[in-house]
């Protein structure tokens, strides 16, 4: 059974597709590789602040689009279709808001694809965007975990020596100023 939320998201994707330069998706209310690729392309268009004529996507849409993109990529770097379905309403609202902000009209009312539906089958190759980049704290934690014990001891000694040096400098400043 087609999902109304996915249908709304597909309609929002197709609203941006002609301006964004990527293919429209079938309006069938279902999740598949074409919808995943269309979602990725539309969010990428918004996140990079593309323009429609002289009107460019404002930061108020770019930042949330970038956040969504990071949530839609699995650890292996592939587009996570389940994550897209979990955020379909949020994605549709974001894409429609960005489209309105740059002056992209609503276009024709959506035509629901039904058994054959007249939509040409377009082969879509899966996209792999490489491994997901973790934040600074996660990279630091993984680096620490990968260090040998002697390296951890060396880092500890270095941090302690730095602490003593800074403490000495602060003491000298406060004793000079007294």
Image: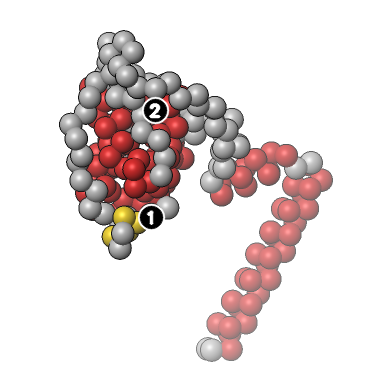
On the rendered structure, is 113 left or right of 75? left
The residue to which callout 1 is attached is 49
Seen from this angle, which residue lies furthest bottom?
Answer: 177
Residue 127 placement, left or right of 57: right
Residue 130 lies, in percent from the top left, at 60, 37
Q: How crowded is mark 1: few (under 14 residues within 10 Å), some or many (20 or more)?
A: some
Residue 50, percent from left and from top: 38, 54
- Any part of residue 107 in sight: yes
Instruction: Give the side of residue 95 with respect to residue 177, left or right.
Output: left
Between 160 and 101, the one lying in front of the other is 101
Residue closest to the eye, 162 or 54? 54
* Front-most of residues 1 and 109: 109
Q: Quadrant of residue 91?
A: top left
Assign a secondary structure to mark 1.
loop
Which residue appears at 60% of the width and 78% of the height?
Answer: 171
Q: Is residue 160 positioned above or below 128 on the image?
A: below
Q: Residue 35 carries which label?
A: 2
The answer to whether residue 90 is seen in the rendering is: no
Point out the tag, 1 or 2, that comes first from the N-terminus: 2
Residue 174 drawn above or below residue 115? below
Q: How many labels does the image show?
A: 2
Quadrant location, the N terminus = top left
Q: Which residue is drawn at 68% across and 44% down?
A: 143
Q: In which quarter of the image is residue 128?
A: top right
Q: Distance between the residues labelled 1 and 2?
A: 21 Å
Residue at the location (50% across, 24% down)? 123
The residue drawn where x is 54% and y is 27% is: 125
Q: Residues within 10 Å of mark 2 (few under 14, many from 20)?
A: many
Residue contact between numbered discs 1 and 2, judged by CB atoms under 8 Å: no
Task: From the top left corner, tell me how far across and down residue 122 is, in percent.
Answer: 45, 25
């Amino acid at each position: 059974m087609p999902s109304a939320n996915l249908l709304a998201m597909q309609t929002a994707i197709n609203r941006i597709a002609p301006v964004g330069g990527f293919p429209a998706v079938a309006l069938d209310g279902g999740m598949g590789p074409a919808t995943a690729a269309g979602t990725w392309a539309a969010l990428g268009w918004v996140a990079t602040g593309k323009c429609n004529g002289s009107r460019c996507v404002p930061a108020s849409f770019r930042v949330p689009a970038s956040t969504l993109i990071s949530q839609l990529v699995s650890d292996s770097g592939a587009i996570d279709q389940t994550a897209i379905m979990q955020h379909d309403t949020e994605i549709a609202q974001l894409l429609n808001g960005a489209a309105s902000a740059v002056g992209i009209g609503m276009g024709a009312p959506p035509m629901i694809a039904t058994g054959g539906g007249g939509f040409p089958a377009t082969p879509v190759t899966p996209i792999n965007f490489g491994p997901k980049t973790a934040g600074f704290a996660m990279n630091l934690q993984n680096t620490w975990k990968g260090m040998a014990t002697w390296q951890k001891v060396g880092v500890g000694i270095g941090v302690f020596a730095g602490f003593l040096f800074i403490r000495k400098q602060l003491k000298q400043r406060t004793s000079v100023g007294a």
